[in-house]
């Protein structure tokens, strides 16, 4: 097995310099202890074009293909953990706004998001509907050329920090499907609060947002009534493949540090690596990280070619999360007592990556997505 080297990219030096100048690795650690939304770094990332790497340059992004953007996010995650790599994806999580919003909405919210000046969240989940997202109930009642929103969103990231959110609901008397709206969060009738302290990724400060008869103009609707989930599906596919790269980047850094540690740390008069019980899992983790990385890269390349990779992207995220968690768990284990402590970064990395098995489609739901590709639903006979 070769020594690990990060893949090169013409932007790699610029990215490494940004990480160092803004102390992103240290900030990512500090945000775990004192959870807050990292507004200064968000603004700096926007100013230096590290938000929304695939966003077209006409909208302020770098317009990179998804495969190259993911390789850079892998590098960012390797250098600084999940926080800023995920933050970089925030415009990717808002493609429904970018593609379906009016020019006015894009100017008011999407461009400032890419520039790091306004944070836009996503609100799908409700207390009774998470995996089964089609069961959401938030009501959008047509009212004098606009809508009145009533309902509750839960589990959402940036519950109190988002300046606006893409909110999914059902139009009363409208079509079957779900409709997306862009809702500024300061509107009268919106109540927000953070709920509990998360296992990891605490900077996201998740919580609930309640809408009570909140008026939004018709111009805040994103696309057509009833089509919201059709718009968000391609976005989910892209983001899942890119998230896979992020989890693999974090796990690879843990693996590199553990391989080095196992070769150096002495026990019973020889390095830990002289024990097969330590060496073999690390060798396997290294190969599995490569395998998941290759699968993810192939998925992203096929995505960039315009192929349907919904099932592959789902599997890429599930596989990357599983392998990353196992690798980081070995990092905790082989660093012994200090590995278990927040003196070292591994336990935090494990907690942060653990969200990957739940958010943006749980691992079970991702298997369902992939299975539906193998056995598409047939119309009833
Ligand atoms: C860090 C983080 C950030 C998040 N950010 C957001 C956000 O910004 N916006 C937002 O809208 N939501 C967000 N969520 C919520 C997330 O999307 C949901 O938690 C997720 O979809 C699961 O829904 P649930 O919590 O209701 O669990 P449930 O749907 O109740 O599922 C519970 C468990 O049952 C399993 N399960 C459910 N159905 C099946 C089935 N048919 N077969 C097998 N297993 C099944 C699930 O996989 C899961 O393990 C976030 C979650 C996390 C952890």
Image (cartoon, rainbow, N blue to C red):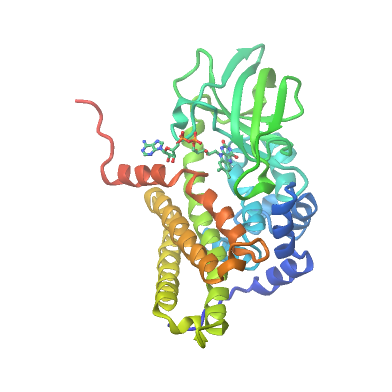
Residue 359 location (% of width, % of height): 52, 44
Residue extending farthest front: 268
Between 202 and 370, the one nearer to me in the picture: 202
Residue 304 visible to an observer of this rendering:
no
Up/down of 380 relative to 337, above or below:
above
Nearer to the camera, 65 or 51: 51
Q: Where is residue 197 in the image (x, y as percent from the top left)?
A: 65, 42
Residue drawn at x 68%, y 50% is 59
Query: In this picture, is 372 found above or below 123?
Result: below
- Above or below, 166 relative to 212: below
Instruction: Answer with left or right where residue 183 lies relative to residue 254.
Output: right
Measured as percent of width and height from the top left, residue 194 is found at: 69, 35
In which quadrant of the rendered image does the C terminus lie? top left
Residue 196 or 129: which is nearer the viewer? 196
The relative height of residue 64 versus residue 176 in the rendered view (above or below) is below
Given residues 127 and 62, the one toward you in this image is: 127
């Amino acid at each position: 097995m070769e020594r690990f080297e990060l893949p090169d990219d013409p932007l790699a030096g610029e990215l490494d310099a940004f990480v160092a100048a803004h102390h992103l690795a240290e900030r990512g650690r500090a945000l775990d202890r004192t959870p807050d939304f990292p507004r200064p770094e968000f603004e700096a990332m926007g100013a230096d074009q590290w938000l929304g790497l695939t966003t077209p340059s006409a909208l302020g992004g770098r317009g990179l293909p998804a495969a190259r953007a993911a390789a850079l996010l892998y590098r960012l995650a390797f250098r600084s953990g999940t926080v800023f790599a995920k933050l970089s994806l925030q415009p990717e999580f808002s493609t429904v706004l970018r593609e379906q919003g009016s020019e006015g909405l894009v100017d008011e919210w999407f461009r400032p998001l890419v520039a790091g000046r306004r944070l836009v969240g996503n609100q799908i989940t409700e207390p009774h509907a998470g995996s089964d997202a089609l069961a959401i109930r938030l009501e959008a009642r047509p009212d004098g050329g606009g809508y009145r929103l009533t309902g509750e969103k839960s589990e959402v990231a940036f519950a109190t920090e988002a300046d606006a959110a893409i909110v999914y609901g059902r139009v009363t008397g409208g079509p079957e499907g779900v409709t997306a709206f862009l809702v500024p969060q300061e509107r009268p009738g919106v109540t927000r609060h953070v709920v509990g302290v998360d296992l990891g990724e605490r900077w996201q400060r998740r919580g609930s947002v309640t809408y009570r008869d909140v008026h939004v103009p018709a111009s805040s609707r994103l696309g057509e009534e009833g089509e919201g989930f059709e718009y968000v599906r391609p976005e989910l596919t892209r983001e899942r493949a890119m998230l896979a790269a992020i989890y693999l980047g974090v796990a690879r850094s843990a693996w590199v540090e553990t391989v080095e540690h196992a070769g150096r740390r002495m026990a019973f008069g020889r390095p830990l690596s002289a024990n097969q019980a330590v060496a073999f899992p690390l060798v396997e983790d290294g190969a599995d990280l490569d395998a998941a990385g290759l699968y993810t890269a192939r998925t992203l390349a096929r995505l960039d070619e315009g192929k349907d990779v919904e099932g592959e992207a789902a599997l890429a995220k599930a596989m990357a999360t599983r392998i990353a968690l196992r690798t980081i768990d070995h990092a905790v284990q082989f660093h012994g007592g200090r590995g278990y402590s927040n003196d070292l970064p591994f336990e935090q990395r494990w907690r942060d990556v653990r969200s990957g098995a739940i958010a943006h489609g749980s691992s079970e739901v991702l298997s369902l997505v992939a299975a539906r590709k193998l056995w598409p639903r047939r119309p009833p006979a």
